[in-house]
Amino acid sequence: MRLKQFFKSRAFYKNLGLSILIAVALVWITLQSLSFYTNHGEEIKVPSLYGLSLEESTNLIKETKLRHTIYDSVYNSGLPAGCVLDQSPKANALVKRNRNIFLTINSLKPEQIRFPNLIDNSFRQAYEILITNGFKIGKLKYVDYDYYNLVLYPEFKGDTIKKNDLIDKGAHIDLVLGRGKNIRILTPKLIGKYFNDAKERILLSNLNTGRISFDDSVSNLSDSLNAQVYQQSHEYEENSKIAPGSKINLWLTTDSLKIKDALAYFKSQFKQ
């Protein structure tokens, strides 16, 4: 009976109301604290850091109330040492304050790799070994030797390379190969090929890329990579063969009409 009277009393309702107010206040304080802690509603646009020095990038990151970590470093000889090559999140992404920006910077020096053994391998085997190890093929030099396309020795900047020598990753390696006896190479078909495709086809035909000429349609690096061959020296003929290691000169354009005309002329030559 007393308990029933208590639930009907003023004191009960007073305590109940006070408890509700305290609970509401605690929930409000908690939500406000979480909002402050997570910077709720505050977004910062990530600045573009590509190409900036590490010092410039650090200052810009601090100004925008962000943080950074150097995540990786790679070597690019075409850009200044120590500059930013990549960032995550990307430029213009919206992030919270104090977000960590991961940077990839350009190494001060290229990574060096112990050179693999190429001697007495075929050209194709040497090609695969070099590409797998992060090197590039430079010139093919043919000398008198009975076995055609056998690697006699590799060179870097005119010096012979030995197994386990430390060589810059990405370096262009020249190969000195056996000429064989009376070996002749069929000139590859290059009309219409993109620049890099044409160079690779020349190389895999055991030939060298000679003079490169771009017409007026090519004005920057992007254009050059998208340019196509409209003329080549040692034009392809069904029975025309040249010595291994010979140079093929290329003329390139981004003019689609010039390419179309070159392809039409090339096809007409073989319909006759």
Image (cartoon, rainbow, N blue to C red):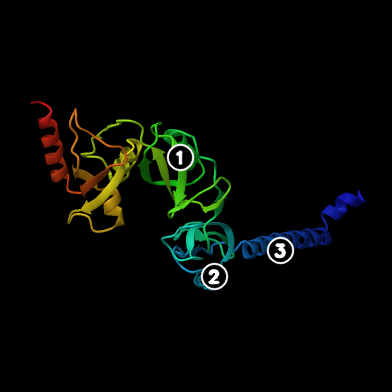
Quadrant holding the C terminus: top left
Nearest to the eye among marks 2 and 1: give it. Answer: 1
Q: Earlier in the sequence, mark 3 or mark 1?
A: 3
User: Amino acid under label 2?
Assistant: Thr
Q: Position of residue 145 (x, y in %)?
A: 39, 35
Q: Is residue 13 left or right of residue 111?
A: right
Residue at the disc numbered 3: 25
User: Amino acid under label 1?
Assistant: Leu
Question: Residue at the spot x=58%, y=47% of the render?
Answer: 164
Residue at the disc numbered 1: 152
Instruction: Please say if 44 is above or below 265.
Output: below
- Rendered image quadrant of residue 111: bottom right
User: Is residue 214 or residue 240 the one in the foreground?
Assistant: 240
Report how far apart the C-alphas of labels 3 and 1 lie in the structure. 84 Å
Q: Position of residue 261 (x, y in %)?
A: 11, 40
Residue 58's mark?
Answer: 2
